[in-house]
Amino acid sequence: MSNTPFVHTNRPGPRAKRLQEMLRVDHAGEYGAVQIYKGQRAVFDRLPQKARLSGLLKEMEEGEQKHLKAFDGLLAEHKARPTAFAPVWNIAGFALGAGTALMGEKAAMACTSAVEEVIEKHYAEQAEELGDTEPELRDTILEFREDELEHKDTAIAEGAEDAPGYGLLKGVIQAGCHLAIRLSEKV
């Protein structure tokens, strides 16, 4: 008989841990998206000639708020914690939104298009990974993916690809998004 006491931990198994990582990063992504739209609106809401654009950004922000609220509930349901990087994503998201808005309408739309493209692809990969193991979560993610595709299409229709330096701007923003995903999954 061993003298080593049995130590019980509440650590989740590998599958539950992976699910918590998914939820953590999705929550962080939606949180960041809300902050980006808030930053863009902080600029455009002050310009009466940009009222139509501000209204469009508000609608997209409301969609992201709906997603964020759903992930708030899913984090609690699956006993997952939000990312420790939330304060960073708060500042970075707002700064990215405000910064691209200050560069102009098309740059703001380029930002939206770039971010939404990363998110929708990420959601597609997650849905595939989940398969039939978590059908409700998979369906929620696929529903949110459709919303992200709609936001991306709206941004492109609003001139995202006509932004000066679009390719560079898109590349930098998407690299930042991929880094944020990796960090938020683990931390």
Image (cartoon, rainbow, N blue to C red):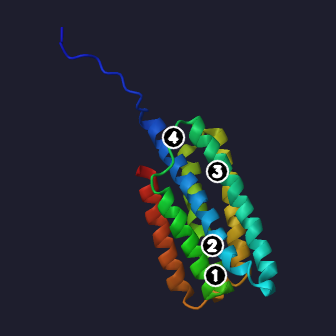
Judging from the image, what secondary structure is the residue with disc 4 in? loop
Q: Earlier in the sequence, mark 4 or mark 3?
A: 4
Distance between the alpha carbons at the discs numbered 4 and 2: 28 Å
* Element at label 2: helix
As helix, strand or loop, the secondary structure at mark 1 comes to: helix
- Disc number placed over residue 39 in the picture, else none: 2
Residue 43 is situated, as x and y percent measured from the top left of the image, at: 67, 80
Q: Which mark is residue 141?
A: 3
Q: CA distance from mark 2 to mark 1?
A: 8 Å
Are dots 2 and 1 in contact, CB under 8 Å? yes
Q: Residue furthest top?
A: 1
Question: Which residue is identified by label 1?
Answer: 101
Name the outermost residue toward the bottom: 164
Amino acid at pointer 3: Ile
Dot 2, how many residues are within 10 Å of its Cα: few (below 14), some (14-19), or many (20+)? many
Amino acid on which the number 4 mark rests in the picture: Ala
Mark 1 closeness class: few <14, some 14–19, many ≥20 residues within 10 Å: many
Q: Is residue 181 left or right of residue 71?
A: left
Kind of residue at badge 2:
Gly
Instruction: Tell me, for residue 87, which label it has, or none.
Output: none
| C-alpha gap between disc 3 and disc 2 | 25 Å
Nearest to the eye among marks 3 and 1: give it: 1
Tell which of 90 and 161 is nearer to you: 90
Helix or strand or loop: what does disc 3 sit on?
A: helix
